[in-house]
Image (cartoon, rainbow, N blue to C red):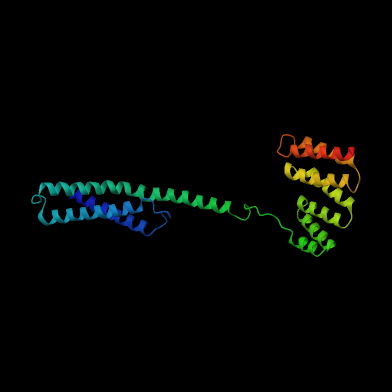
Amino acid sequence: MDFYVAVGAASALNLGIGWAVRSDLHLGRLSCGRSVYVHAGFALLALAGIGMVTVAAFGPSQTSGLAERGMLAAGSLMVVFSALAIPGLCLVPFVTFLVGEYAHRGARFLMSEDQVRVAKTYDQAEACERQRDWEGALAAYRRALAEDIEDWEARRRMAEVHLKTGDVGAAVAGLRLVAERIAEPGRKAAVTFRLAELLAGPQRDRAGARALLVALAAAVAGTQVAPYVKLRIAALDEESAE
């Protein structure tokens, strides 16, 4: 009867673990493997129970050899299942819980406000520009620069506002600073082209404009914008020859 006591204890153990997992008592949020263990546990519990009732009612001697072997096999499976239940029900869901939890945290980190880059806007300054309120626009851009001294787009826009007010010197100084600090070839070329136009046009400094473009050609050599810089230099040389 010691064997049947062991079977009964194993059945109770599986029933308790199965109930705990079914109730999600901190064994993991994911249900990976849960249904298999719970349903198999209850099935073996039922078989073991039938075996014990049969043997208790008729006695081992009156139980057919096939039925007894079947019940003993079910009981043995129940004991083995009990030995696997704890690591299977506790460890596997716990590991899947850790994987799922850290995957969830990683997704939240990647989607957090600190990680999502949003293009900066200059709504106040643009509103002032539409109303031709140049002083208001300059003040708005100065506030942006006070928050971020390396906001080169705000400085470039401020240079354009200076140009609209007729202050070409301030515009040239602002664009020159932006052109020197920007590293991305496309943006650097765009600002330098604008600066060269002001030098060759309002300030009548073609030599300065050409020197600026030659320096740009060296800085962006090997990039996609390099051919356009050469075309600008050639166009400026043609204008100077006329």
Q: Looking at this view, is 76 or 169 the one in front?
A: 169
At horizontal 73% and vertical 43% (from top left) the residue drawn is 186
Q: Give the x, y percent position of residue 108.
A: 55, 54
Q: Is residue 167 visible?
A: yes
Q: How many marks?
A: 0
Compared with residue 139, is residue 214 higher up or lower down, i.e. above or below? above
At horizontal 57% and vertical 52% (from top left) the residue drawn is 109
> Which image quadrant for residue 118?
bottom right
Q: Is residue 184 visible?
A: no
Q: Give the x, y percent position of residue 32.
A: 38, 51
Decide if residue 164 is on the left or right side of residue 44.
Answer: right
Q: Looking at this view, is 220 or 58 the one in front?
A: 220
Q: Looking at this view, is 185 or 108 the one in front?
A: 185
At horizontal 27% and vertical 51% (from top left) the residue drawn is 10
At horizontal 37% and vertical 60% (from top left) the residue drawn is 23
Decide if residue 46 is on the left or right side of residue 238.
Answer: left
Kindly give the residue lying farthest to the front in the view shown: 242
Q: Give the x, y percent position of residue 194.
A: 81, 47
Decide if residue 233 is on the left or right side of residue 2.
Answer: right
- Quarter of the figure that contains the C terminus: top right
Q: Looking at this view, is 133 or 62 the one in front?
A: 133
Kindly give the residue lying farthest to the left in the view shown: 62
Q: Give the x, y percent position of residue 28.
A: 42, 54
Kindly give the residue lying farthest to the right in the view shown: 204
